[in-house]
Amino acid sequence: MRTSVPEKLLKIIDEIDEHGQAGLTRLTVLKKWFECPNRLSAFVVWVAARAVSRKGKKSGTAATLFLEARTLLAGLDEITPKLNRQAAQRLHDRLRDFQNEYKSQQWGPVRIVHNWNLLLVEEALSAYLWHDQSPSHGYKLAADYCRHYDPRYGESLNGPSRTKIGEIVRFMFTVEALEDDRTSI
């Protein structure tokens, strides 16, 4: 089913081009898109697959976790991915334990994240396993996937974010087209 949400995301890219940044909350338009059945689970699996495909130095436990995640996510249907729930939960728990370090700050404990892509996979698996009917979890994952720190703008959607938003738009067009194909059969 075709929606106007991808076009709204393209306007965010235009805003970044014009003003240098856009607020993370602009991505809340995704919540409406996630209300359609299966879209949230398809999106979180897509984000996890994108996160584990990123280049970078990986060694030791991190390299093992990346390999396990790639194996778990391989060959899934784009619209209705079906993860092995037990394997997904085991991997989620291992990912959480891998980065389970907190530092006390004056306002409370802060989680120390050594590998952002592994955190994205952890969040995606959490959304898939326990929050598959929560568009808010999809929005948070999208915001975490797209955010970029720039000292001029802080933590927002800016330069490098535009590429990731464009990737999400292409994903959405693909899902909508595949949905249309399946309903026309």
Image: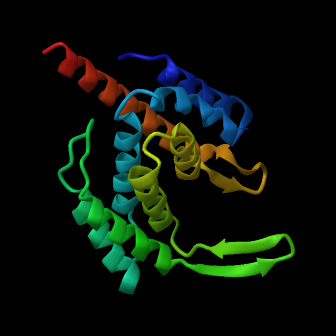
Q: Is residue 41 left or right of residue 144?
A: left
Task: Say whether residue 160 is visible.
Answer: no
Q: Quadrant of the C terminus?
A: top left
Q: Is residue 32 left or right of residue 50?
A: right
Instruction: Quadrant for residue 122, please give it.
Output: bottom left
Query: Residue, x 34% and y 41% (percent of image)?
Result: 42
Query: Residue, x 50% and y 65% (percent of image)?
Result: 119
Q: Position of residue 93 (x, y in %)?
A: 42, 72
Q: Position of residue 105 (x, y in %)?
A: 81, 76
Q: Nearer the viewer, residue 147 or 3?
A: 3
Residue furthest to the top in view is: 184
Q: Position of residue 115 (x, y in %)?
A: 51, 71
Q: Quadrant of the N terminus?
A: top left
Query: Residue, x 23% and y 58% (percent of image)?
Result: 84
Position above or below: 165 against 60: above
Q: Is residue 107 left or right of residue 72?
A: right
Q: Position of residue 161 (x, y in %)?
A: 57, 45
Query: Residue, x 26% and y 54% (percent of image)?
Result: 83
Q: Nearer the viewer, residue 54 or 19?
A: 54
